[in-house]
Image (cartoon, rainbow, N blue to C red):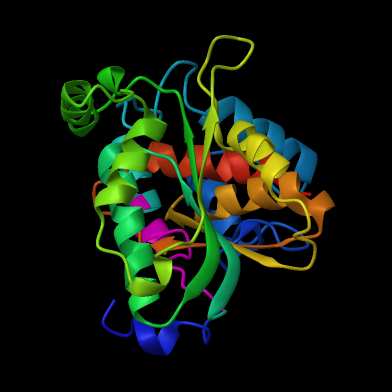
Amino acid sequence: MKKLAIMVALLPGVFGCEAIWNNGPTQLLKDIFKITEIDNVDDFKFATQQANFRWIRPTGYERWNIYSILNDSQRARLTKIIKSSALAKAKMPTKKHYHAVVVLGATTSRVKTRMEFLMKLANHGVTWDKIFLLGSTRDLNTGTDQDQKMAVFLRRMSAAETEIGMMQYLWSQINKPKFCSGIPVISIQSGQRADGTRANTENSLVEMAKNIENSQGKSILFISNNPYICYQDAVAKKVLNSFGVLVETVGEAMGGGESMENVLDTVARCLTNMN
């Protein structure tokens, strides 16, 4: 982050789904398929089907749940190539001003990190006209240790013990630059889907789309973190494409504790959501 001021607006890089598929499978995807022993990567439909069948996390599991689909050798080889790829690197914005910024929901610790990342951008001259907090009604009591601690804290304040409740509280507490005073903060809350599972990024974006009228041709900056940037960028573009907005997704580098299963899940979802 020391070189952030230099990097902002100078290094667009390849961090979207083009890092996975760019007029054909990238070398990164070919390497991933080889390590996980899947053939016929050149067929997009087949590659997508196989990735979904083998890599999407089990139903009911969250990103913080531990499960294994790799042997030790595969995990070591995959970790090596991922760490040197765009899926592990920080992604910086290409502009200095955005019509809106969207903080994507996650666990308590991750949302806090995303908001801190946004404040670092603001301290280096990035500004915006409004901000969206994109969360769900996910019960924090069923989440990580940090989620559960936040749930207890919110309960004492008689506040909603949900992901969106946590996001609203964290945003109210973070040290913000002066230009944020008076800027609209719009909370987008998504509930359960029809099958009883919690809302995902796409569900939340559909709700957000109801609040972005007259935004055609304007830029919206999404705050995520790697390895999820490529997937969430693809979903945002898929949902918001018809509104004519310019979507850009940025975030911090992948943390050292991220599982390779989460990386594979992300690659599969990226392929699924490519236009």
* Above-or-below relation of 233 to 43: below
Give coordinates of residue 48: x percent, y percent. 69, 38
The image quadrant of residue 252 is bottom left
Front residue (pair 136, 235): 136
Q: How many labels does the image show?
A: 0
Residue 169 horizontal side relative to residue 50, left or right: left
**Which residue corresponds to the image point at 73% horizontal and 44% vertical from the top-left?**
239
Asked if residue 225 lies left or right of residue 206, the reply is: left
The answer to if 80 sits in the magenta stretch is: yes
For the point 60% across and 54% down, the residue is 233
Percent across and percent down for residue 184 are 51, 55
Q: Position of residue 186 (x, y in %)?
A: 52, 46
Observer able to see residue 227: yes
Residue that lies at the very extreme toward the front in this rendered image: 182
Q: Nearer the viewer, residue 10 or 164?
A: 164
Residue 143 on the magenta segment:
no
- Residue 84 seen in the current view: no
Q: Which residue is rendered at x = 65% and y = 49% of the image? A: 236
Is residue 224 shown above or below 96? Answer: above
Q: Residue at coordinates 53% horizontally, 84% vertically from top-left?
A: 9
Residue 141, percent from left and from top? 26, 18
- Give left or right: position of 3 versus 156: right
First to last magenta residue range: 79-94
Residue 232 higher or lower than 108, as above or below: below
> Where, quadrant-wise, is the N terminus in this rendering?
bottom left
**Magenta: main secondary structure:** loop
